[in-house]
Image: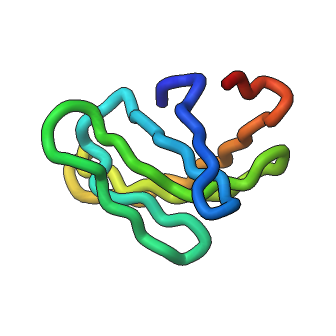
Amino acid sequence: MESPAALRIEGGKAVATLVWSSPYYESMRVDGTDYEPLSAGGNSTFEIPVVLDADMAVSARTIAMSEPHDVDYTLRFDSATAVP
């Protein structure tokens, strides 16, 4: 995943644009909600709501292996490193 990620505040909530280093992620799940990639082609890119300064559990479905697999990740968005 590209780091740092782009982050914006929308409706009082933080939203991150995540760009994976692979085109083979077909969905992400955050707090029980599924998110689809922004567009076809290129590396998989998602916009998801995020929590700042706390570990965040997410799951991403990849089709890079012989069959689709959900892979669990822990993300952390550190507000101390945010720049305008």
Q: Residue at x 35, y 42 (%)?
A: 45
Residue most toward the bottom? 32
Q: Position of residue 14 (x, y in %)?
A: 65, 52
What percent of the width, then of the height, locates residue 76? 73, 41
Residue 76 position (above or below residue 82): below
Nearer to me, 39 or 21: 39
Q: Quadrant of the C terminus?
A: top right
Q: Quadrant of residue 65?
A: top left
Total numbered circles: 0
The image shows residue 43 at horizontal and vertical percentages of 27, 33
- Examine the rendered structure and indicate whether residue 41 appears above or below residue 62: above
Name the quadrant containing residue 53: top right
x and y, in percent, of residue 41 in the image: 14, 37
Q: Which residue appears at 39% of the width and 48% of the height?
A: 46
Rendering colour mode: rainbow
Rendered residue at 77%/47% (across/down): 52
The foreground one among 81 and 36 is 81
Q: Residue at x 51, y 58 (%)?
A: 59
Q: Is residue 15 above or below residue 1?
A: below
**Nearer-the-camera pick, 37 or 12:** 12
- In the figure, is residue 75 to the left or right of 28? right
Relative to the observer, which residue lies in front, 58 or 82? 82
